[in-house]
């Protein structure tokens, strides 16, 4: 057992507040860019600790600076926003909030991705490190990031002067709860989460009455042909040993039954692990769209808008090599190898901006009996709720314990005396 494992087994911090804090966050979620109440609760809790709080970075971003003498600087990030999802978990602290979504329509709001747990865990790490300062030296940065779900929060904090408003870290750390046996800590070097982009494509056409299609250039028809051809890019142009996803999330055209519209809109979601594959696929998408427009007689050029970018989470092997043995000591058989996942995150934008290495890992959160039964019956896909589902809910006890200890252990890997 390492010194860090011994310390975590006997730390003096009071963490009894975590459950009520988590349930309060879960019951009162806020959408990306609107985290006013959430950030206020975080700042209020940070007032219990001896730290400098810098708030309203890039909107509702917060950094708590814990200074404890000479030594390295380690940054740990948690995200704080929720999703436009109507909760169906049935727990007493379920969210019943309804808010305007990005399109103005009313929508339910839910912590369906676990950011309430991420926030609770990082505050728990703050409590432990604040209560036992003899165990470490240096500077600990607890960063609470808004607007992860729309992939704008990390860059917003960077654009709002993050690099000059806080000490420069030597390493950045973070974690995400995911389906898996609650309390299991999963790490790996290299590509962990996929890079992603969304692409909004506008197909121009020529409107006409539905009874006179010969007078139109039908953008709906062109868009439909594009959707079909896009599926062949991954299936026929990407090496089967590589990975790429091109999904058509929306196709919008027209507003009534008897008018051929003047334009159509496609929104794609694309994911990759390698930049060379990404560039090749994007060139193919542009080629297909422009060729189909030309085939339909469209003279005006289609437009392409890239948004919702998530950087590849590419864990530094050296950081993994330092943190993983500590996790093995702290968690024993619950410290396991991770598998790379096709979901995406904007966490990497922060260490990339500082130019420092990082490690980002996954913690299982599925109720242990549910996970064990689903695995035994080969029904994980059918029975286990995943992130962004309206029934997603971590098992609090083992998940909060593991995420809090993992955050603390990783920071102490760099700051421990």
Image: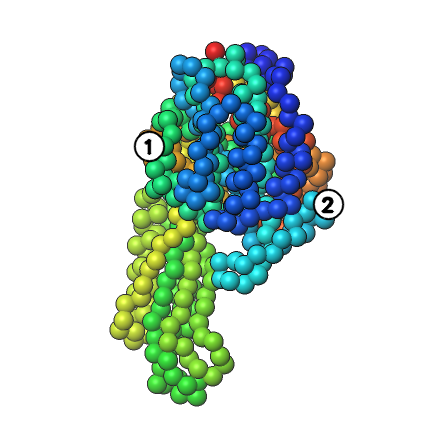
Query: Which of the two discs, 2 and 1, labels the residue nearer the N terminus?
Result: 2
State which quarter of the image contains the N terminus: top right
| Snapshot colouring | rainbow
Q: Residues within 10 Å of mark 1 (few under 14, many from 20)?
A: few
Where is residue 327 drawn, in percent x and y?
A: 54, 21
How far apart are the alpha carbons under marks 2 and 1? 43 Å
Where is residue 374 drawn, in percent x and y?
A: 69, 41
Q: How many marks?
A: 2
Element carrying mark 1: helix
Cβ atoms at labels 2 and 1 below 8 Å apart: no
What residue is shown at x 42% (from left), y 57% (from top)?
Answer: 268
Q: Nearer the viewer, residue 247 or 185?
A: 185
Quadrant housing residue 4: top right
Q: Nearer the viewer, residue 350 or 181?
A: 350
Of marks 2 and 1, the one in the foreground: 1
Q: Is residue 180 left or right of residue 152?
A: right
Quadrant housing residue 375: top right
Element carrying mark 2: loop
Residue at the extreme bottom: 211
What residue is shown at x 55% (from left), y 44% (from top)?
Answer: 37
Q: Is residue 43 left or right of residue 198?
A: right
Residue 208 appears in the picture as rendered: yes
Residue 5: numbered disc: none
Q: What residue did someone put label 2 on? A: 92
What residue is shown at x 52% (from left), y 12% (from top)?
Answer: 134
Q: What residue did someone put label 1 on? A: 164
């Amino acid at each position: 057992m390492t010194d860090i494992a011994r310390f975590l087994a006997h730390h003096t911090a009071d963490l009894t507040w975590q459950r009520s804090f988590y349930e309060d966050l879960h019951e009162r979620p806020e959408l990306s860019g609107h985290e006013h109440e959430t950030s206020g609760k975080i700042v209020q809790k940070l007032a219990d600790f001896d730290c400098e709080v810098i708030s309203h970075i890039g909107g509702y971003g917060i950094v708590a600076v814990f200074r404890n003498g000479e030594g390295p600087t380690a940054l740990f990030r948690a995200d704080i926003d929720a999703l436009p999802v109507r909760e169906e978990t049935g727990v007493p602290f379920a969210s019943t909030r309804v808010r305007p979504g990005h399109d103005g329509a009313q929508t339910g709001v839910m912590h369906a991705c676990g950011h309430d747990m991420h926030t609770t865990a990082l505050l728990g790490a703050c409590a432990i490190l604040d209560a036992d300062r003899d165990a470490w030296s240096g500077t600990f940065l607890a960063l609470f990031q808004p607007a992860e779900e729309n992939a704008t929060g990390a860059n917003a904090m960077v654009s709002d002067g993050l690099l000059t408003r806080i000490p420069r870290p030597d390493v950045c750390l973070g974690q995400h709860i995911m389906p898996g046996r609650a309390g299991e800590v999963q790490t790996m070097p290299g590509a962990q989460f996929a890079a992603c982009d969304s692409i909004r494509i506008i197909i121009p056409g020529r409107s006409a009455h539905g009874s006179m299609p010969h007078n139109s250039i039908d953008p709906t028809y062109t868009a439909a042909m594009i959707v079909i051809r896009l599926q062949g890019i991954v299936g026929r142009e990407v090496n089967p040993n590589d990975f790429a996803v091109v999904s058509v999330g929306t196709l919008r055209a027209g507003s009534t039954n008897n008018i051929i519209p003047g334009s159509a809109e496609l929104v794609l979601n694309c994911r990759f692990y390698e930049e060379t594959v990404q560039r090749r696929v994007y060139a193919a998408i542009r080629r297909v769209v422009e060729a189909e427009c030309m085939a339909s007689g469209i003279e005006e050029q289609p437009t392409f808008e890239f948004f919702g970018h998530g950087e590849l989470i590419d864990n530094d092997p050296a950081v993994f090599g330092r943190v993983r043995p500590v996790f093995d000591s702290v968690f024993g058989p619950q410290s396991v190898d991770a598998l790379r996942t096709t979901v995406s995150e904007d966490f990497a934008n922060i260490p990339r901006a500082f130019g420092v290495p990082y490690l980002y890992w996954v913690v299982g959160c599925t109720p242990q009996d549910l996970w064990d039964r689903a695995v035994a019956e080969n029904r994980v896909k059918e029975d286990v709720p995943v992130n962004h589902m309206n029934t997603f809910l971590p098992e609090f006890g083992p998940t909060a314990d593991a995420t809090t200890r993992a955050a603390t252990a990783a920071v102490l890997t760099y700051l421990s005396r």
